[in-house]
Amino acid sequence: MWGFLRFGRARSVAQETIAKSIPTIPSTRRCFSLGAAKMAGLRDPNTLSNYDAWRTKHTTANLKVDFEDKCLRGSVILELESQTDKASNEIILDSSYLAVDSVTLNSSPSAWEIKDRTECYGSPVHVAVPEGVAKGEIVKLEISLATTHKCTALQWLTAAQTSNQKAPFMFSQCQAIHARSLFPCQDTPDVKSTYDFNITSPYVVVASGVPLPTETEGLEGEKLYKFEQKVPIPSYLFALASGDIATAPIGKRSVVATGPNELKESQWELEADMDKFMDVAEKIVFPYQWGEYNVLVLPPSFPYGGMENPIFTFATPTIISGDRQNVDVIAHELSHSWSGNLVTSCSWEHFWLNEGWTTYLERRIQAAVHGNSAMFDFSAIIGWKALEESVEGHGKDHEFTKLLISHMGIDPDDAFSTVPYEKGFHFIYYLDRLVGRENFDKFIPFYFGKWATKSLDSYEFKATFLEFFGAPGYADLKEKIAGIDWEARFYNPGLPPKPDFDTSLVDVCYELARKWKQPGFSPSPSDISSWAGNQVLVFLNEVQGFEEPLTVEQTQAMGKAYGLAEGKNVELKEGYYQIAMRAKDASVYQGVAELLGQVGRMKFVRPLFRSLNKVDRDLALKTLERNRDFYHPICRQMVEKDLGVAGA
Ligand code: BES
Ligand code: ZN
């Protein structure tokens, strides 16, 4: 019953960000998914597990962080509930590049086998359950394992690669489908499990669970760090980090954790906004359900801006820019505590339910914190521009520009782009305007309350919306609601209808950009000195979009007057370097190469590499080679794909 799926080649593009990121899928890299899950009638095509027959209810991870061998080793115990009456004689789990040692079923050795690897979904582990078990009964599967050097979820840094050079460091990144390279599991957002973490390490450990007292007995030079996660979470939210980590308070229920040298500046960056974000978010949705909300600021190779791991959001150090201008990432990750972590899209096809809702909540938080509704539109305008570029890059009919993206045979990392964020945002925002803010504000807690601790698809979202607004109290909205073209919103590729934005915060940025079109314009630092970082970004985006590139003289004058290459704000540096590379201003190439050795956040790394590759491929390849060990495996893989080099 295995079928092979072929699909078209995604167009490759020059200018993108993570949020604008565009996949290139060379034929050698296509995932020939067997689509087993889909064929079995499962909602998630990106898992090889038979989660229709069994569901993980609880997971215990007993893992030792082995810095010498750069691996995690130990065991996981999965408590799986039978969904059928003695019908299933095997449990199939996802795994990827794992060394599995032994498997026991209810404490007895059992027959098991790792089947051949399928790009890109891994090698399913089949465990025999000879007699099957009654529906509702729970079996305990204990698996001894170690991760391998091919693990895609972990990055290991030597002490020399850390800022204070005192201790090695490791961290995980499981979203979207990398948890299977940590331990065998049902690696699908459609299954949620509670967790116990028992992690042994010589260094401080943080995890996506609530910390319990640490134990030291019988452990030489190591400690046992324990955590529990009582709210059921999908596998992609399993997270660990270990190293020389110190903490400082940033809010009522929040600490920032990071290297001791970076602690003070990280605390300063976040302490002014943390509780404000939390207070507003709780008012918009309902009280925070997870206990603590902390932020771990990672080393510069962290491949994302932020990752919403429960209890500890993992964040890039590029948000510690010394000006509190990049804390919107925290408003975003905090919002995931409701959209994504509590209420979860059941597969990567419905990912917009996570990111679209989160982008909407993030913008609501920003507007409320600043007491300025123009902030909402300001951020939405930046997002719209990114969406336009993404749609243009993919081609306006491309599958990846739909709200619901078919993921059969697709690596979710390849389908990742700004589309689910911004198209998702625009769908939610459209519904908000359609029913009116006052009504929509009542729907928000209803929706999150109804689906809390569960996973859902877009149709269940639709049904929930229709259920809520079908109530007699909303009879006056009947016609409007009947007019929603759900199918078009879900499946039309390309840009959604564009709303009117309040442009009051961006008009000055456009105005300055216009001046740069005039011959002989002479810039001065005062052009932008009073602006927020995001305003400078809007200006740079505008200039990037000019039909004609600037001249080398102009880009040099811009860099000098605005000090863009010197600042700490990587977002602005990247924007400026893009403009200069487009102008073929060779004087910045070395600066670009240097920056590529300092940050590993894909939002910057991938577009910088793509542009550098265009103007100086040799330097791009050398830069990749030089920084191979610096980048996270996911980032390295994506850059290799983007540049079309071996190893990809
Ligand atoms: N959950 C995402 C990051 C992610 C998505 C990791 C898909 C792996 C696969 C996170 O919440 C996110 O969106 N981060 C953004 C932050 C931004 C939109 C404020 C980022 O990393 O740039
Ligand atoms: Zn997000």
Image (cartoon, rainbow, N blue to C red):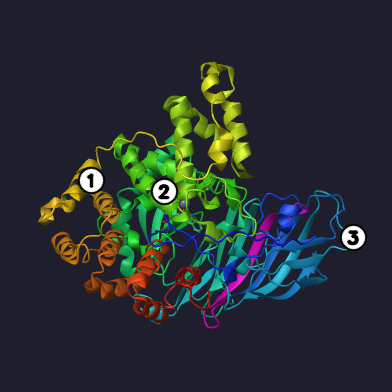
Work out whether residue 302 can be spotted.
Answer: yes
As displayed, is residue 259 above or below residue 291? Answer: below
Work out whether residue 166 can be spotted.
Answer: no
Q: Given the image, on which type of amino acid does mark 3 rest?
A: Glu
Q: Quadrant of the N terminus?
A: bottom right
Q: Position of residue 298 (x, y in %)?
A: 41, 66
Residue at x 59% of width, y 50% of height: 349
Closest to the observer, 116 or 645 = 645
Q: Is residue 69 magenta?
A: yes
Q: Position of residue 27 (x, y in %)?
A: 58, 68
Circles 2 and 3, Cβ within 8 Å, touching? The answer is: no
Residue at x 76% of width, y 71% of height: 103
How far is mark 2 from mark 3, CA to CA? 52 Å
Q: Position of residue 66 (x, y in %)?
A: 55, 78
Look at the image and give the residue range highlighted in magenta.
51-71
Residue identified by numbered label 2: 387
Crowd band around label 3 with a 10 angstrom C-alpha radius: few (<14), some (14–19), many (20+):
few
Q: Which disc number belongs to residue 510?
A: 1
Mark closest to the chain's N terminus, 3 or 1: 3
Q: Given the image, on which type of amino acid does mark 1 rest?
A: Tyr
Closest to the observer, 564 or 396 = 396
Report helix, strand or loop for mark 2: helix
Magenta segment main secondary structure? strand
Q: Quadrant of residue 610?
A: bottom left
Report helix, strand or loop for mark 1: helix
